[in-house]
Image (spheres, grey):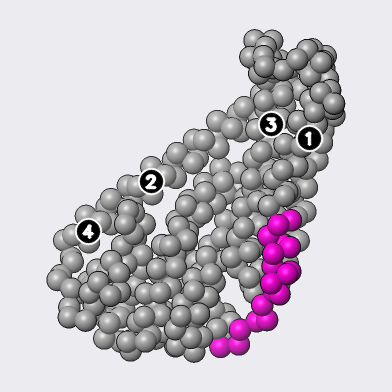
Amino acid sequence: MTVCLLLLSIVALTAAVPVPRALTRADWPEREPVVALWVWQCLVATVLLCCLTALALGTAAVFSTVRTQLFAPAPPSVTEAYDLSAAPAWAAALTVLLAGGAAWTTAMLARELVEARRRRGRARAHLRERAPDLPAGLGSARGPLLVLEDEYPDAWWMPGSPPQLIVTTGAVHRLTDHQLDAVLTHERGHAQARHDWLLHLSTALATGFPRIPLFAHFCDQTHRLVELAADDTASRRCGHLTTALALIELNQHRGVLSCANSHRLLGERVDRLLEPPPRLGRRHRAMTTAVASLVPLLPLLIVFGPGLSALA
């Protein structure tokens, strides 16, 4: 068991500190934001799995009742392979620490979801008071769309079932038809990819553990990469130039992104659309995705390794 806990700690620390720092300095995530989002999710899953599996082993070592229930289906040789009866004192301390971390993580996630639901409820109530009838030409062809009487040009999406796309009359009058299509496709890309769940998860982890580099970088990069991914969705359908012009027209009066959760300057996104960076090759993209997908399996291999060896 001691070896398993040490290996899990090494994997968790590696995924939580040096790897995210190296990833933030790389330039390929800007070229492949969807792949980069997947890599970040795999890193977070690896750390969480390391903590959960270490918590399970530590709890089984400290409490004989838990050990009996956890290893009930396994033959005695498997239980002996983990040597849970000779747990060192630091294993008990680590178990208490991990249990507190698990409880705190659950509380942060619950808090974020409750607050998000309240914000969404207030926003929907406010929209019901302001929403006029849909003007001609902006009907079902563009999907679920709500047009607000407001001279301020803006467009956003509201998570829910179904998600609601919202655009102001100021944006309708300011943008051309193609530019409006690009803006709505951008927002629809957020809705289809369910970026709200990623934003909630990253915000909760960064709020609960602000000093852990992985969670802090995960939050910052998620808010950035979801915008780049939605830009790519819009540019593939409406063209790079049209999407760039739409962003300029919609945001030139404020100079920043319309998304309240993002702090990247508009100019960086426009430059990326006007001069698209070279994409990764299909083989490179598939290899990166496959390797990232295998990383969360490391904690499981470490935990199940002694048991599988005993059965063999």
Q: Amino acid at mark 1?
A: Ile
Q: Quadrant of the C terminus?
A: top right
Query: Can residue 257 be seen here?
Result: yes
Q: Position of residue 82 (x, y in %)?
A: 80, 21
**Residue displayed at 60% across by 68% down:** 33
Q: Residues within 10 Å of mark 4 (few under 14, many from 20)?
A: few
Q: Amino acid at mark 4?
A: His
Classify mark 2: helix, strand or loop.
helix
Q: Nearer the viewer, residue 181 or 105?
A: 181
| Residue at the spot of label 4 | 126
Residue 115 marker: 2
Q: Position of residue 280 (x, y in %)?
A: 70, 74
**Residue displayed at 83% across by 20% down:** 81
| Residue at the spot of label 3 | 53
| Residue at the spot of label 1 | 302
Mark whose residue sits in front, 4 or 1 = 1
Mark whose residue sits in front, 3 or 2 = 3
| Mark 2 or mark 4: whose residue is earlier in sequence | 2
Mark whose residue sits in front, 1 or 2 = 1
The span picked out in magenta is: 274-291
Query: Can residue 216 be seen here?
Result: no
Classify mark 1: helix, strand or loop.
helix
| Mark 3 or mark 2: whose residue is earlier in sequence | 3
Q: Nearer the viewer, residue 197 or 161?
A: 161
